Image (tube, rainbow, N blue to C red):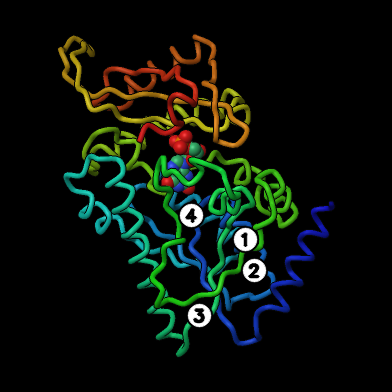
Amino acid sequence: WKVQDVLQEQIDLIATTVGPDDHAICALSGGVDSTVAATIVHKVMGDRLHCVFVDNGLLRYKERERVMETFKRDLHLPVVCVDAGSQFLAKLEGVVDPERKRKIIGAEFIAVFDEFSRKLEQELGKKPKYLVQGTLYPDVIESCPPPGVVGHSHTIKSHHNVGGLPPSMKLLLLEPLKWLFKDEVRKLGKLLGIPEGFLKRHPFPGPGLAVRVIGGDVTEENLETLRLVDEVFTASIKEAGLYDEMWQAFAGILPVKTVGVQGDKRTHSGSVVLRAVTSEDGMTAERYTFKREFLDQVTREICNTVVDVNRVFYDLTSKPPATIEWE
Ligand code: XMP
């Protein structure tokens, strides 16, 4: 097939599906899939598409500024940014269990999205009719296991998306990527003028940095440390020209303080873990093997620049037995 034909087919399909006065809403995550899906729908519906980007306070270093810039400057998408950080953090206070963190974040996200849609309804004087989702073919297969496949629907981690919207919202789905794989979506994105750097971004989990404050309280302080460490690691990978060689690279905070010496002082500070993996589809993964000098330099930079970190670990585990994320 040709990317151009797939794009045209989807544009035609949406154009014949939606009426001239219908409105659609879309939650942009900052990832490739929702961005490509929204950009296709925007070509047909223009400003009758209403996108929302939720800042849940669990985003990476300067993430909100970076993605909003791409949405507006490069893609001209109509996007409202909802600042819901304190709302999410209040709900997460004292929660350390990974599944509970995920459930709380999923439920809070739906509450924010519902509120966005209600406000929009008041502005428009009518309900939006469609919901745009960046569902890919592997997501479709995963949620509809073929008959007789045992263990397929077993929840390893509850992945958070907008699948669980309240029935009262009664939205019809527009899923222009439903028959495509990730590499095909990237090609489509390129054709749509989405910047290459954006299309090649590593995946990022819906529950964000909350699942990288490992076994710990999701506090503003922990999140800030994590953002800085993650940024040093990712920027060093990009600088070394290694970013496209891996599926994902990120940092996590470990729930342990250790003794160290920094300057001429004894410290009792935090520890972080770095993880980088290669993978075809995220279902299995191998650890990425850095040159030793690279890890030495990143470790030095983290301990020198991030206050409250005096120890750095590197995760050697494949998936299985580990998962890519720690929670
Ligand atoms: P695991 O940790 O299960 O992750 O090996 C496989 C891939 O999925 C990403 N991931 C998520 N993505 N919502 C998402 O959209 C989630 O809740 C979520 N949890 C994990 C993970 O980063 C990896 O790329």
Disc number for residue 37: 1
Residue 141 screen position, x and y as percent: 60, 50
Q: Are marks 2 and 1 in contact (CB under 8 Å)?
A: yes
Q: Residue furthest front?
A: 148
Query: Along the polypeptide, which appears first: circle 3 or circle 4?
Result: 4
- Tell me the CA gap for discs 1 and 4: 11 Å
Q: Residue at x 51, y 41 (%)?
A: 150
Residue 159 screen position, x and y as percent: 43, 48
Q: Residue at x 20, y 54 (%)?
A: 90
Q: Which residue is mark 4?
A: 29
Q: Secondary structure at mark 2?
A: helix
Q: Which residue is mark 2?
A: 41
Q: How many marks?
A: 4
- Tell me the CA gap for discs 3 and 4: 20 Å
Q: Which residue is mark 3?
A: 128
Q: Answer with left or right where residue 290 lies relative to residue 6.
A: left
Neighbours of disc 1 within 10 Å: few (<14), some (14-19), many (20+): many
- Tell me the CA gap for discs 2 and 3: 14 Å
> Amino acid under label 4?
Ser
